[in-house]
Image: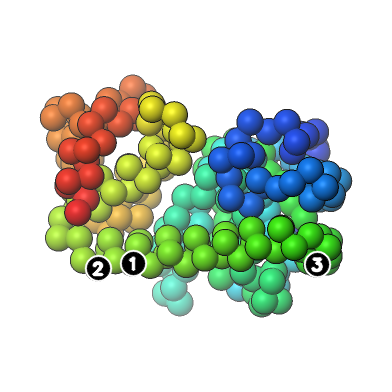
Amino acid sequence: MLRPSIPPVQRDCGNCELRSLRMFCNLDQAALGDFNAIGVQASLPRGATLFQEDTVSSGVYVICTGQVKLSCTSKDGKTLILKIAMPGDVLGLGAVISGSRYEVTAETIQPTEIKSIRREEFLAFLHKHGEASLHAAKALSAEYKAAFFDARRLALSGSAAGRLASVLLDWGRAAACGKAEMRFTMALTHEELANLVGSSRETVTRMLGRFKREKLIQIRGASILIVAPDELEQLSV
């Protein structure tokens, strides 16, 4: 699953500070011990491809740190960014469980640590631990709900500002991990962000500038701090 040139890294799942905040990884001690013993952990650079759309699924990838861009491509070569996956997300889950092909392409957009688990190994783990199977079902349900809300956001939101505000809030909440401060690193270009929210690069650049002037967000380099989440929430409705 991983390129042999990428050196593995050692990470103890039992000591992960994010484990209790992530749906799939929050397992009991017995399941966590077995989960820690399977798979391969690796540190990947920006731009590494985990798997490609329409290829046979070989395993799942759990994001430990970093961000991964999920996209699909039309027959005429146009690429649509569907989601930015965050730490704790399990990529390729649906394809592995159903034995189908990957629906999307997964590419790192910043240095990322992942845990990759072969399909046979992962399915055996789910078969052994009922709690893990339940968590997998909940993760799939969360993917479905996220896809539904993303589609609704694109189809029903009347403004580019509303769609952009919704995306920024999603990322801020995910990065906060239950803490008050909602700060994250913007790893996408304005062109890629425009693709994600169904707008143009010029509009995204203008809206970010507007949010900054109105003190809804603070921007320092690639770092974005959500200053006024309630006001952004009103825009996103």
Give the numbered dot on residue 151. 1
Q: Is residue 191 left or right of residue 22?
A: left
Q: Earlier in the sequence, mark 3 or mark 2?
A: 3
Nearer to me, 105 or 140 = 140
In space, the residues marked 1 and 3 are separated at their CA atoms by 33 Å
In the rendering, which numbered label is found on residue 136? none
Q: Mark 3 to mark 2: distance in Å?
A: 39 Å
Query: For the residue carrying disc 2, how many other residues have a C-alpha within 10 Å: few (<14), some (14-19), or many (20+)?
Result: few
Dot 1, crowdedness within 10 Å: few (<14), some or many (≥20)? few
Say if 171 sits above or below 163 in the image.
above
Determine whether label 1 and label 3 are within 8 Å by CB.
Answer: no
Q: Dot 2 lies on which element?
A: helix
Name the amino acid type tagged 1.
Ala
Q: Residue at x 38, y 67 (%)?
A: 148
The residue sitting at 30% across, 55% down in the picture is 197
List the residue tagged with mark 3: 127
- Up the image or down, 132 lies above or below 16; here it is below
Residue pictured at 63% horizontal, 31% vertical: 17
**What is the quadrant of residue 222 in the picture?**
top left
Q: Amino acid at mark 2?
A: Ala
C-alpha separation, residue under disc 2 versus residue under disc 1: 6 Å
Q: Residue furthest top?
A: 220
Residue 169, percent from left and from top: 32, 42
Location of mark 2 (residue): 155
The answer to whether marks 2 and 1 mark residues whose Cβ atoms lie closer than 8 Å is yes
